[in-house]
Amino acid sequence: MTPEQVAAASKPVVLDLGDAFSRDPTTLRRARLLGVSGWAFYISGRAGALGGVRAETAAAALGFIAPDAVADGWDAAARVVPPFEVAAASLAECCRWGAQQLGPLPGTERLSALVERAVVAAEASGMPLFAAWRAMPLPDLSPGARSAAGLRLLREHFTGAYLLAVRAAGMTPLEAVLAGPEGEAGAVACGWPPPYPPIGPLVRRRLWAEAATNRLAAPAFTALGPADGAELVELLHHTRADLG
């Protein structure tokens, strides 16, 4: 497989598995223990890796979430706990989930090794969230925890690449969300209020942005080579299937 083919084949699975820990009930309980809402934990848990930046900066880095929605979560969390502490708690939950859910699965140690090679080789220019998360030390070095944290990093890499591609395609983040598979429901979930622009003219631009995302992410998988790249794709799909 070429690096672009590996990127295209792995992207949907990485986007799913890289965020799976956030949907775990135990992760949501961690938010309550910190004294913040689930939304505030999600926003600061992602953008908090940047440190104590302003809400506008966090919104610019997140990209696809409406700035007002980001500010609501960011400011609410900041009144209770520093953003970086929320990010650290989020990473701890990611590693806990990985150790519990991915650790027992066959192939996890190999998956962690391949994912980490891709993460190390990835280009971080123009992707501040990915760069910030890659610099954070892991609290757990077991294969399951490393796999979960690595998948989360690759998810931020793909998301950052897509944000760059969307802007290069002449689209706004809102337009990209509307042209995506969830349409207006996705826009609502990301905090964008109606009315919305028509999506018909946006579909072709979104397809171009998807292809550009694969090209931007491809250097991360060049380091694997064709055989290991194909193995990574296979392991990712087996892992998602094993999780049910």
Image: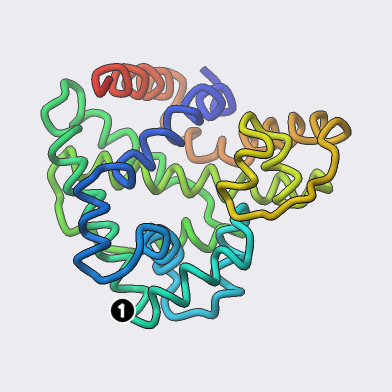
Residue 227 locus on image (x, y percent): 40, 18
Identify the residue at the far right of this view: 201
User: Can you say whether 161 is above or below 39 in the image?
Assistant: above
Q: Give the amino acid type for the residue marked by disc 1 in the picture.
A: Val
User: Can you say whether 211 is above or below 59 in the image?
Assistant: above
Residue 79 locus on image (x, y percent): 38, 82
Asked which quadrant contains residue 19, the reply is: top left
Between 106 and 38, the residue placed more toward the observer is 38
Q: How is the image coloured?
A: rainbow
- Within 10 Å of the Cα at label 1, are there few (<14), some (14-19), or many (20+) other Cα atoms? some
Between 183 and 166, the residue placed more toward the observer is 183
Residue at 54%, 28% (x, y): give it: 3
Q: Which residue is mark 1?
A: 81
Residue 77 locus on image (x, y percent): 38, 74
Between 32 and 100, the residue placed more toward the observer is 32
Give the position of the C terminus as an image quadrant: top left
| Apparent side of residue 204 relative to residue 54 in the rendered image (left or right) | right
Residue at 41%, 66% (x, y): give it: 44
Residue 152 locus on image (x, y percent): 37, 46
Identify the residue at the far front of this view: 194
Residue at 70%, 51% (x, y): give it: 173
- Secondary structure at badge 1 equals loop
